[in-house]
Image (spheres, rainbow, N blue to C red):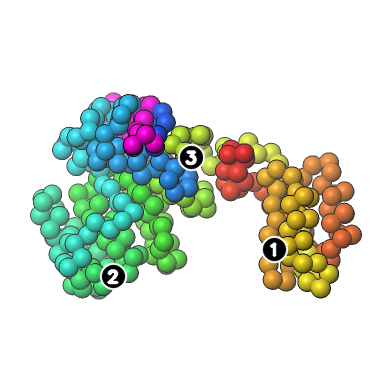
Amino acid sequence: MTDKYVLKIEGLNKIFSGFEALKNISLRVKKGEIVGLLGPNGAGKTTTIKIITGLLKADHGEVSLFGNKTSSAVEAEIKAKIGVVFEESNLYLRLSALDNLKLFANINGVKLNRVKTLLKEYELYEVRDKQVKNFSKGMKKRLMICRALLAEPELLIFDEATGGLDPISAEIIREKLLNLKKQGKTVLLSTHYLEEADRLCDKIAFVNNGRVIAFNTPNSFKDKISKNFLELQFSLQKDKISLDKLKIKLNRFIKNNESFKIDKRRFSILLFIDQYVFKRADQLCRDYQFMEVNREEANLQRVFKEINS
């Protein structure tokens, strides 16, 4: 492959019944990268993935896979290099885990040893003979990943890989994604979890309202926000002020992209570190019972708020 990009998307547009789901989306993914499509539900992530994989046809724009331009029907030779895991299960629920994989292994000319290896690697070998309808959501998602990996594809596409999963299953999948990168695989990961994108991705495309509003490395995003924060924590004395009044006062006190959180016994507030921060902190300490202070560096949550403000 002469092209250094495994995937190139140029100017994708898609309209459903007058609703513009994608608005000129462009993206490039190099070999061996994990690139995240990060954004809220309905941002356009799944529509983009369906166009890449040939399940939808774009109204305008172009997709190139492994240096080859594709139409709505992705060629079999290119499709063989791609493994896709969608958010919703597309397994045969009445079949066992083993039979699900054997079915697709036979279609793709994959040997049984590969099936058994994947079941062991994704901690499903002990339940290989159980019907998939009795699996948890996390187990189904791991089996879907096994199915996507059967033919050892070069590009893996995950739509909400850990969405709605229990913490153990989610952690297993995140570790496996990092292992896939070590093996030289390229991964496109759709997610709405900021912490997950920060941990896993080499680059992140912030997607909102059908647009890629920013594309860079996680550290580059965070470095652009020069403002760090002081987190101040205060004891919550309910007899002195109602929660509703406290929320009103804190909303009036904070600036753009600052925030506060109220728990049962305390509340915390994040203030920008600037020349006025200590004066503002002193004002809060006069009004409320101070407990402790911490410094918090910029994170992707803060980046996303600032990009969208």
Quadrant in which the C terminus appears: top right
Three-letter code, disc 1:
Ile
Q: Helix or strand or loop: what does disc 3 sit on?
A: strand
Q: CA distance from mark 2 to mark 3?
A: 33 Å
Q: Is residue 97 above or below residue 260?
A: below
**Count of picture labels:** 3
Quadrant in which the N terminus appears: top left
Q: Residue 208's mark?
A: 3
Where is residue 255, by image quadrant?
top right
Q: Helix or strand or loop: what does disc 2 sit on?
A: loop
Q: Which residue is mark 1?
A: 262
Q: Which residue is mark 2?
A: 135
1 and 2 marks in contact (CB < 8 Å): no
Where is residue 18, by image quadrant?
top left
Where is residue 5, by image quadrant?
top left
Give the left or right position of residue 112, taking residue 273 as reference.
left
Q: Is residue 247 above or below residue 44?
A: below
Using a 10 Å C-alpha cutoff, classify the residue at mark 3 as few (fewer than 14 neighbours), some (14 to 19) or many (20 or more): many
In the rendered structure, which disc, 1 or 2, sits on the residue that comes first in sequence?
A: 2
Check residue 217 for magenta coloring. Answer: no
Check residue 8 for magenta coloring. Answer: yes
In the rendered structure, which disc, 3 or 1, sits on the residue that comes first in sequence?
A: 3
Q: Is residue 33 above or below residue 127?
A: above
Q: Nearer the viewer, mark 1 or mark 2?
A: 1
Tell me, yes or no, if residue 133 can be seen here.
Answer: yes
Q: CA distance from mark 3 to mark 1?
A: 28 Å
Q: Nearer the viewer, mark 2 or mark 3?
A: 3
Q: Compare residues 163 and 153 and report the one nearer the observer.
A: 163
